[in-house]
Structures are given as structure tokens and as C-alpha cells.
Image (spheres, grey):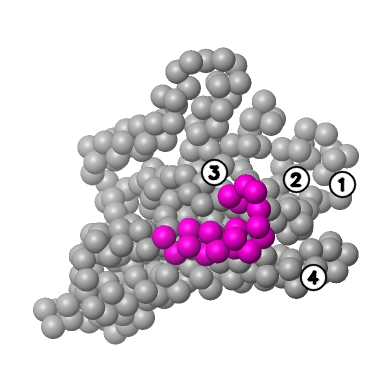
Amino acid sequence: MIGYITRAILLGVPMLFGATGEILTEKSGHLNLGIPGIMYVGAISGVSGAFLYENSCGNVVENMNPFLAVFIPFICAILGSAVMGLIYSFFTVTLRANQNVTGLAITTFGIGLGNFFGASLIKLVNSDMPSIALSKTSNFFCTKLPFADDLGWFGELFLSFDFLTYLSVIIAIIASFVLSKTRVGLNLRAVGESPATADAAGINVTKYKYFATCIGSAVAGLGGLQYVMAYANGCWSNDAFGDRGWMAIALVIFALWKPHFAIAGAFLFGALCNANNYLNGLGVETQELFKMLPYVVTIIVLIFTSMRKKREHQPPAHLGLPYFREER
């Protein structure tokens, strides 16, 4: 059971990163359906950085600096995904393009870009398998606290994860605090609810939209990096990311646009996804049906929140709508 829970948490962390980033973006009034592609780009950017650093060290662990082995992929993932968010912002904020179409285009472009660079790296290593193994970098990412093994089940359940797992929870808590307790968060929510009113109050709507989308994309990109380095143990193969990005978008609805709710929701989604593998090990023949559970739960939550019609449980009023200052 402890193994099941820890695996569920690892499955949920990429979704938590993606959901937190998407919540920040949606609070500015932008529905970014490009999150799956942005997470994919974040993953391949981190993989590329790790690959180049490992090769520069001759693939010898003793030549690798632990700090640089983590820092380089980390920064590459943030920069790669932030650039994707900048592209999305340029089209939807500056050019006022349709947000749904732009988001889907970003997803298609991001996955294609990731597969292109992934295939290029695979050719460089001349591997018999269509994948790249970055186990040395993965080991640095997954370094446990030295006393975790001495604490039995408690250490395994709470202290045995990679640092990105803990960072995902910290970022979600900070995002929740900023959105609800700070002036920056108040201004951002005002932009998402009524950009014309926010503009009249002297808030720079364009700056907040760009800022929220780029920061949200950078956070989402870390989910792709965590998936490769922690869940997949440093192994990259094209099209192996699955539907984590789409589940992150579903998690936003499940969490009612509140980052701290997304923490429990992500681990619940991870447990529901892992139920498929768990039942498969028990010989249950209907385990494929359990892959639908996260989406079914999200639909149920959406129905109940729509019926109750509480404003705090609804998306930002201006979500998905372009803002024309001339119409104010």
C-alpha cells in the first residue's frame, strides 16, 4: 500500500505543476489549452540540457557537479516553457487571436517540437532503443534525505521523493497565498474578472496577462521535467508523456481554480491513474475502465459546482474572452 501511495504521488506531481500554472494563467482571463504542449517542451528542454551536460562531462559521474546536474535541466525547462508561454501571450494578448485555437496550436507545435529534438538526441546516441537514458542526472534529482531510510514507513511515505515533488507543493501554496492575500494577486484576479474595470483603476492589463501566462507556463514546464527525471527515471522516449497535460487542465476545474485544492486533487488523480496498474497486477480484467476515473470525477464536480452557482466556485468571468481597450 505504501508503494501504491508513493507511486500515486509521483503520478500526480506533473499534474499539480500543470494545474498550478494553468490556474495562474486562467486567473488573468486566458484559457491556455496549450499546457500539454508547454509541459512537453519543458520536458525536452530539461532533457536537452541534461544530455549536453552529461556529454560534456564524458558521461562520468565523478566529473559531474551535483548542483549543475540539477540546475542546468531545471533552468532549461523553465526557459523553454516560458518561451512557449510568451508565444501564446503574443498571439492572444497582443494580436487578440482566439484563445482556444491558439492553445490547441501551441499543444500541437510543442509536441512536434519535443519529438523533433527528442528524435535528434536519440540519433546522436545511436541507441538500439528509441529512447535516451539520463540515469546519472535522474539520480541527482532523486537524491533522498540521508535519514529517510532510517524512519521506516514514515520516511518512505514522506521523505523519499525528489525535490521537485516538494517544490510542486510549495509553489501551489505560494500561488494560493499570492492570489488571495497580496495586492498582486488581487490585481490579477481583477484582470480576469473584469479587465475594463481593472484598466480604469490604473492596472496594466497587458502586463498582468503576459506575466501570469509566462510564469504559469514556466511552472507547468517543471511538471514535464519531473515526469522524465523522477517518474520515468531519466528516460525520454517520444510520445511517452501520455495525457498528463490534459489531466492538469481537468484538475483546474476539479480544484475550483484554487491552487491549494489542486494539491489533494493531484494526488487523488494520481491514485486513480495508478489504480489501473494496481488492478492489472491483481489480474483484474476491467482495469482499462479506471483510466477514465479522473475525467469522470471532474465531470461530477463540474456538475455540482454549476448547480450550486457559487461565484467563488466559478471560473473568472472574462475567461477565454479577448480584451479590447477601445471598447471600454
Q: Earlier in the sequence, mark 4 or mark 1?
A: 4
Residue 298 placement, left or right of 149: left
Majority secondary structure of magenta residues: helix
**Hey, what amino acid is under mark 2?**
Leu
Residue at 11% in and 79% down? 327
Q: Is residue 44 among what the camera can see?
A: no
Determine whether 158 is above or below 291 in the image: below
Horizontal relation, residue 6 to residue 63: left or right? left
Farthest residue, direction left: 327
**Residue under numbered circle 3:** 12
Tell me which segment is drawn in magenta: 112-131
Asked if disc 2 and disc 1 are in contact, CB closer than 8 Å, the reply is yes
Q: What residue type is labelled 1?
A: Phe
The disc at residue 57 is 4
Q: Quadrant of the N terminus?
A: top right
Q: Is mark 3 on a helix, strand or loop?
A: helix
Q: Can residue 121 be seen in this view?
A: yes
Amino acid at the residue labelled 3? Gly
Location of mark 2 (residue) = 159
